[in-house]
Image (cartoon, helix red, strand yellow):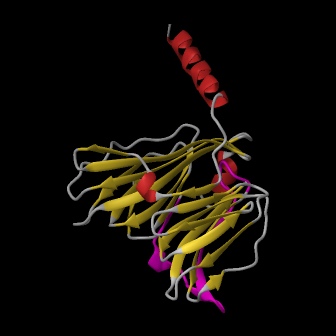
């Protein structure tokens, strides 16, 4: 009976994935994400579907109020995660190792590792979770050799000035699911573009942390502020610019 049930669950998963639609590119606005509230917690569903290099990708945002009970520790069998702290103070524990992360802290979580996230501050903790499975076979050994899971605090990284502002590199590496996963923060201190419009093989997300921007993707123009993000699919011509006289700041991360 156990074998039959397991087989049915696998079949259901395959059917569900086969019915998934490709994620749309363009603007995803924070104020438009549906909110589900429970005791001292809020969840926001953002997207779910497929992408050119991923057979499954899902993104959501979670808010834990002060004193919220964290979810139980768990592991993902065949899902990798990237987690970004928007606000608050998080205690993240992976395989028994814990670290405190503040705003713009990032976690790269390999599959099959026990983990738990907890609000240990006196303000709301809000973070984005991107969960994904590659179309190519999962490669745990590759991810381990590249550095395994990461817990990165923003203040542990070096800001590199540029002519238009500066940036903070987080990582550029292989993972268990991706042949390349690259993430950095860009800050633009001047009105105008970050760089000329361009294309690349990777799908890319631009997640706004501060300021206001405008981005053109495949001939369409969008505007975003803090909490919003843009998504440009593999091969789409895209370019971003700062709309204000003050600074803007955003995460850029891409994968294939």
Instruction: Classify residue 105 as left or right of residue 117.
Output: right
Residue 215 picture quarter: bottom right
Vertical position of residue 31 compared to residue 197: above or below: above
Residue 194 in the image, given as x and y percentages of width and height: 67, 80
Q: Residue at x 64, y 25 (%)?
A: 14
Q: Could you tell me if residue 52 is visible in this image?
A: yes
Residue that protrudes farthest toward the top in the picture: 1
Q: Residue at x 66, y 92 (%)?
A: 163
Residue 57 picture quarter: top right
Instruction: Classify residue 234 as left or right of residue 127.
Output: right
Q: Residue at x 59, y 87 (%)?
A: 191
Vertical position of residue 55 compared to residue 226: above or below: above
Q: Residue at x 61, y 68 (%)?
A: 252
Residue 64 in the image, given as x and y percentages of width and height: 30, 54
Q: Quadrant of the C terminus?
A: bottom right
Residue 53 in the image, given as x and y percentages of width and height: 73, 47
Q: Could you tell me if residue 94 is visible in this image?
A: no
Vertical position of residue 92 compared to residue 87: above or below: above
Stretch of the chain drawn in magenta: 150-179
Residue that protrudes farthest toward the bottom in the picture: 163
Residue 56 picture quarter: top right
Whether residue 86 is in magenta: the answer is no
Whether residue 168 is in magenta: the answer is yes
């Amino acid at each position: 009976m156990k074998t039959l049930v397991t087989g049915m669950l696998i079949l259901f998963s395959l059917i569900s994935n086969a019915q998934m639609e490709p994620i749309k590119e363009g603007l995803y606005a924070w104020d438009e994400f549906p909110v589900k509230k429970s005791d001292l917690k809020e969840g926001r569903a953002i997207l779910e579907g497929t992408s050119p290099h991923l057979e499954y990708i899902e993104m959501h945002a979670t808010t834990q109020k002060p004193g919220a009970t964290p979810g139980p520790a768990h592991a993902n069998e065949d899902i990798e995660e990237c987690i970004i702290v928007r606000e608050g103070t998080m205690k993240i524990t992976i395989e028994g190792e814990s670290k405190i992360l503040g705003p713009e802290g990032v976690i790269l979580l390999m599959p099959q590792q026990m983990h738990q996230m907890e609000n240990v501050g006196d303000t709301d903790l809000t973070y984005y979770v991107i969960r994904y499975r590659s179309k190519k076979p999962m490669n745990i050994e590759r991810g381990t050799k590249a550095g395994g899971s990461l817990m990165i605090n923003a203040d542990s990284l070096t800001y590199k000035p540029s002519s238009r502002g500066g940036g903070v590199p987080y990582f550029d590496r292989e993972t268990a699911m991706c042949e390349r996963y690259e993430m950095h923060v860009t800050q633009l201190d001047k009105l105008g573009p970050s760089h000329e419009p361009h294309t690349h093989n990777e799908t890319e997300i631009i997640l706004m942390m501060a300021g206001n921007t405008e981005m053109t993707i495949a001939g369409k123009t969008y505007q975003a502020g803090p909490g919003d993000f843009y998504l440009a699919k593999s091969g789409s011509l895209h370019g971003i610019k700062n709309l204000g006289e003050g600074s803007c700041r955003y995460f850029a991360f891409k994968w294939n």
